Each structure stands twice: as structure tokens, then as C-alpha cells.
Image: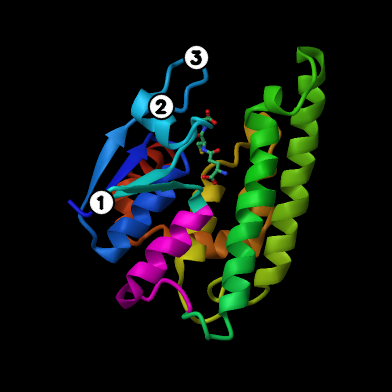
Amino acid sequence: MLYKLFYAQGSAAMGTRVILEEIGASYELLQTTIAMDEPRPPEQLALNPNGWIPVLLWGENAMYECAAITVFLCDRHPEAKLAPAIDDPERGVYLQTLVYFSNSVQNAFQLNYYPDRFADTPADEPSAQRRGNRRLRETWKVIDDQIGDNEWVLGEWFSAVDIYLFMLTTWLRPSRGHPSVDEFPNVKRIADAVLPRRSVQLVYEEWIAGHAG
Ligand SMILES: N[C@@H](CCC(=O)N[C@@H](CS)C(=O)NCC(=O)O)C(=O)O
């Protein structure tokens, strides 16, 4: 077994799993939870005291942070052609977009999904959630404009950034006040193009069934 992955449905670990599938790596899923009222396995907390996932293990090593894991896996398996090489002109936009996804778009989701981490008192939480929703609209618009007419985020080349984009769109819930993906036609075009991939069909089977029709 090459890799192990702390994993839960609906989490950022799903994007990592899609990348492992695309690479064709052998891996084992270590089931955990993202429910706020359930404990995390001590083995997970020992590797990531934040309690969140993904956490990737290989050999005697482990790491967390989804964007960092993405870079790590794609560099380790260049034959999968999921990332521009270190001297490729697209490398800059690749890294820029992964980090923007991680620290701006994901952060906006966190404001809405975990407002207690951003608000001083429970009474302040709805305000944090509303700001998170506005921030989602702002950050997705930046990405939509960046993509423009591109076929994929990096132009003509499908990459791990497109997988990351797809994962983030699955978290959009207009019922929570989030913008709909339909507000960002360039993002939607790429998410729709990622959906039929075998890796995505496998990992997102449950989510796809819930969104049928
Ligand atoms: N910055 C981290 C954030 C990961 C994150 O927020 N994971 C969520 C699931 S999508 C999680 O584990 N939530 C449970 C928790 O935060 O306790 C990353 O990109 O890996």
C-alpha cells in the first residue's frame, strides 16, 4: 500500500482521493469524520492537531493541507501529467490558483460552515456566516474572470487545479445563502467537464446520485 488517507464523505479529502485515482496509486482510506460533535481518531489528531482532513500518510511520513498534498502528489507522479513541471511557464498560475483556492475560497466556506472559529460570541456567528457568503461570491468571481474562455484553468491542459475546482463547487449550497455555481459560467463549464471523469464518478458517486436531474 503506497498511501493512506484520512477520509470522510463531503470533505476536502475527496479531492485528494480523486488525484490518487488519477495517478493510479494504491491507497487505503482511513475513515474519520468532519462532524463537529464527533471525536477524531487519536491517530489523526497526532498527525494533524487541527482535526481536519485530508491527512496523507506514506511510509513513515505524513502531511496535511490539501493544496500542499496536491502539489506533493503531482510532483511525485509526473507521469500522470496533472501539474506543470517546475520550469513550465504555467507553473506560476498552477501554484497561485491552488493556494488561492486553499486560503481564500476555502476560507470563505469555513466562515459559513464553521462560524464559531471566526466569531467572538455565538451572537456574532450569523454575521461571520453572512460575510463568508459574500466572500464566496467575491472569490469565485475572481476565479471565473481568471478562467475566461480557457478550456481548463491552465488553458488547454487539464490539471489537478481543475479537480480542486470541481471539489470546491460541490460545497456550494444556495440554501445556505451561498452563490450558485450558475453565477460563474466559466467555473461551471470546467466543473461540468471534470464530472464525467472515471475518477470523479467513482469518488463522487454519492454526491452525483444526490444531484441527479
Ligand atoms: N486548510 C485545510 C482545511 C481542511 C478542512 O477544512 N477540512 C474540513 C473538511 S472539508 C474538515 O476537516 N473539517 C472538520 C473540522 O474542521 O473539524 C486544507 O486545505 O486541508
Q: Secondary structure at mark 1?
A: loop
> Label 1, on which residue?
59
Task: Tell me: 4 left or right of 150.
Answer: left
Task: Say which amino acid is labelled 3.
Answer: Asp
> Label 3, on which residue?
37
**Lower position in the chain sequence, tag 2 or tag 1:** 2
Crowdedness near tag 1: few (<14), some (14–19) or many (≥20) residues, C-alpha within 10 Å: few
**Lower position in the chain sequence, tag 1 or tag 3:** 3
Which of the two discs, 1 and 3, sits closer to the camera? Answer: 1
Which of the two discs, 2 and 1, sits closer to the camera? Answer: 1
Task: Tell me: 8 left or right of 3.
Answer: right
Task: Tell me: 205 left or right of 37.
Answer: left
Magenta stretch? 67-84
The residue at 51%/48% (across/down) is: 65
Task: Tell me: 85 left or right of 197.
Answer: right
Against 83, residue 73 (above or below) is above
| Residue 27 position within the rendered picture, expressed as x and y whole percent measured from the top left | 23, 50
Crowdedness near tag 3: few (<14), some (14–19) or many (≥20) residues, C-alpha within 10 Å: few
> Label 2, on which residue?
33
Assess whether mark 3 and mark 1 are in contact (beta carbons under 8 angstroms).
no
| Residue placed most toward the observer, 195 or 213 | 195
Task: Say which amino acid is labelled 1.
Answer: Gly
| Residue 166 position within the rendered picture, expressed as x and y whole percent measured from the top left | 50, 55
Task: Say which amino acid is labelled 2.
Answer: Thr
Query: Would you say the magenta stretch is mainly helix, strand or loop?
Result: helix
Quarter of the figure with residue 134: top right
Residue 42 visible in the displayed image = yes
Q: Secondary structure at mark 2?
A: loop
